[in-house]
Image (cartoon, rainbow, N blue to C red):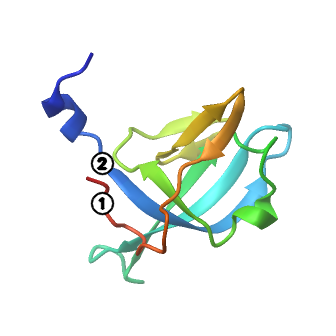
């Protein structure tokens, strides 16, 4: 078990998928560009991240664009197949099939999950 204080350290946010593409050499990994909402440190005013997710056997890139998902925003970056993943998408395991977690209704990108 983890403590409540440890759990509070996890930054869960809503992200909107802007682009999605298959990663050459992998039937499972997809490269997603996601919008995390307003960011004063970015000249475009929006914070975007690249997330590599193992959801390519269930989802096509085309069906993901425009969807809102839940991500861990403060996870240390990690390289997967030579590409940096700047967060982690959350999915439920349905008998080995990842089912993306998403809000019930439209929520602005960057919204914090409490």
Q: Which residue in the rendered view is the most extreme toward the front? A: 104
Q: Secondary structure at mark 2?
A: loop
For this view, does 80 lie left or right of residue 44? right
> In the rendered image, is residue 53 in sight?
no
Considering the image in quadrants, where does the N terminus appear? top left
Which residue carries the number 2 mark?
Answer: 11
Percent position of residue 35, x then y: 49, 69
Q: CA distance from mark 2 to mark 1?
A: 7 Å
Percent position of residue 12, x then y: 35, 50
Percent position of residue 104, x then y: 49, 64
For this view, does 38 lie left or right of residue 97? left
18 shown above or below 92: below
Task: Give whichever of discs 2 and 1 has the lower sequence position.
Answer: 2
Depth order, front residue of 2/78: 2
Q: Label 1: how many residues lie within 10 Å, few (<14), some (14-19) or many (20+)?
A: some
Depth order, front residue of 86/66: 66
Residue found 71% across the figure and 61% down from its top = 20
Name the image quarter holding residue 68: bottom right
Q: Label 2: how many residues lie within 10 Å, few (<14), some (14-19) or many (20+)?
A: some
Which residue carries the number 1 mark?
Answer: 112
For this view, does 15 lie left or right of residue 10? right
């Amino acid at each position: 078990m983890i403590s409540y204080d440890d759990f509070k350290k996890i930054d869960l946010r809503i992200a909107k998928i802007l682009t999605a593409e298959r990663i050459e050499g992998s039937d499972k990994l997809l490269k997603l560009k996601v919008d995390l909402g307003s960011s004063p440190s970015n000249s475009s005013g929006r914070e975007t991240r690249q997330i590599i997710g193992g959801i390519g056997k269930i989802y096509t890139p085309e069906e993901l664009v425009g969807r809102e998902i839940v991500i861990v925003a403060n996870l240390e970056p990690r390289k997967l197949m030579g590409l940096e993943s700047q967060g982690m998408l959350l999915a439920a395991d349905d008998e080995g099939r990842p089912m993306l977690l998403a809000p019930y209704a439209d929520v602005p990108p960057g919204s914090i999950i409490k």
